[in-house]
Amino acid sequence: MNQQQSLQGILSIAAIVCMAVGWFNLFSPEINELLSRKIFYVLIGASFFVQAPLLSNRNFMYGMYAAAAICVIGAFFPTDSKLSMLKTIGLLGGIIISFTNRSSRS
């Protein structure tokens, strides 16, 4: 396992911890919302950014960079904004690209 894969794993685990903290309401509502609706998506976007150069298909690589950017940008929109759904679109896009790349390597 190389250093990029390790960093991606750490970012992904940190994102999952942020999501879990928000779900279980371990802190004040403001902190829970910040962790699960903002920091989670920034960490996932960073994870996608680190994963992008590891993808075998160049088109997938560019798509993963786009998904990463959409996750991070969407995280900074207010929660009640219609544009905040961009973060979810970026998340789904990154997951689809990740799974599609795995199936093509097998």
Image (tube, rainbow, N blue to C red):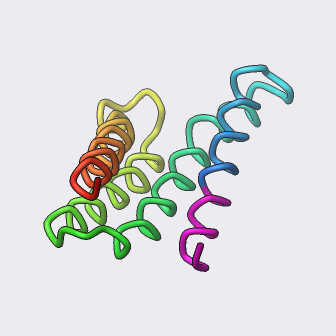
Residue at 31%, 68% (x, y): give it: 55
Magenta: main secondary structure: helix
Q: Does the segment drawn in magenta span residue 9?
A: yes
Query: Residue 17 at x, y = what percent?
Result: 73, 40
Q: Is residue 32 above or below residue 66?
A: above
Query: Residue 65 at x, y = what percent?
Result: 30, 66
| Count of marks overlaid on the render | 0
Residue at 27%, 50% (x, y): give it: 97
Residue at 35%, 68% (x, y): give it: 52
- The image quarter containing residue 27 is top right
Between 39 and 64, the one nearer to me in the picture:
64
> In which quadrant will I find the N terminus?
bottom right
Residue 91 in the figure: left or right of residue 11: left
Q: Residue furthest top?
A: 24
Q: Is residue 19 above or below residue 69?
A: above
Residue 16 in the figure: left or right of residue 96: right
Q: Is residue 65 above or below residue 22?
A: below
Query: Residue 37 at x, y = what percent?
Result: 56, 36
Write down the region rendered in magenta: 1-11
Residue 98 in the figure: left or right of residue 59: right
Between 3 and 76, the one nearer to me in the picture:
3
Q: Does the segment drawn in magenta span residue 8?
A: yes
Q: Is residue 36 above or below residue 62?
A: above
